[in-house]
Amino acid sequence: MRMTDTIKPIALTILMAIAGVLKAADARATTIETLTVAGGCFWCVESDFEGVTGVIEAVSGYTGGTTENPTYKQVTKGGSGHYEAVQISFDSDKVSRETLLNLFFRSVDPTDAGGQFCDRGASYRTAIFVSNSAEMALAERAKANAQSALGQTIVTPILKASTFYLAEDYHQDYYKGDDLVLTRFGPKRQASAYKRYRQACGRDKRVRELWGSEAPFAAGY
């Protein structure tokens, strides 16, 4: 066997090992963070933020209350203390928490203390949940920025983060689901039912009224 025949597989092994180390280093360098917000219907918040560059995923759930492992019926009935919320996982090298917070304020009606759009009640109120003083400072700055830009009092509270409970499976990615559901408009595929609901609820109409050209997600509806 020639010396070069022995060297080639050794070199290949070394290169593969180096590639593996570099890939692992890149993975460690990626900083994954989470931001939890309540903005009314969690289907809509999830739909909006999953389209933002740098967002890895957004999941629907319940948080802020005292009931353990709450159901959708318990939360919307009232008394659980929970908000309909969305937990957004994002790559902070691609999008900052501050940017996401600014987008959030401009995707809701933060002047409404009784719910959001056609969805009324405590579980549909807006809120931001924070885990430490740095997150609190960013949220307070984004809130002040939104209040200055809007020229109206922002009632969205900034709350200490608590346990986030995942919502039922059928709520996850509802906006793009293909299951057949019964609605007041008749049987519809989930994605179609979602669009009809969002339009009928007046979410984007109200957001455009408040924020005009600053509304980041309302233009598509």
Image: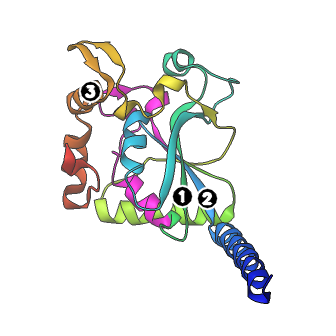
Task: Inspect the magenta stretch and tell me whether residue 107 lies in it.
Answer: yes
| Cβ–Cβ under 8 Å for marks 1 and 2 | yes
Say above or below: 161 vs 26: above
- The residue shown at (62%, 36%) is 64
* Residue 108 is at least partly visible in this image: yes
* Residue 141 is at least partly visible in this image: no
Count all numbered tags in the image, as a single digit.
3
Q: Residues within 10 Å of mark 2 (few under 14, many from 20)?
A: some
Residue 90 shows which numbered tag?
A: 1
Highlighted magenta segment, given as a residue range: 98-127
Task: Quarter of the image for the C terminus: give it.
Answer: top left
Residue 197 shows which numbered tag?
A: 3
Looking at this view, is 43 or 16 the one in front? 16
Which secondary structure lies at badge 3? helix
Q: Residues within 10 Å of mark 3 (few under 14, many from 20)?
A: some
Residue 206: where, in percent of width, then height? Answer: 22, 42
Give the spatial CA distance, label 1 vs label 3: 27 Å
- The answer to whether 168 appears left or right of 165 in the picture is left
Which secondary structure lies at badge 1? strand
Q: Which residue is mark 2?
A: 33
Say above or below: 33 vs 81: below
Name the amino acid, label 2.
Answer: Glu
Task: Inspect the magenta stretch and tell me whether residue 109 lies in it.
Answer: yes
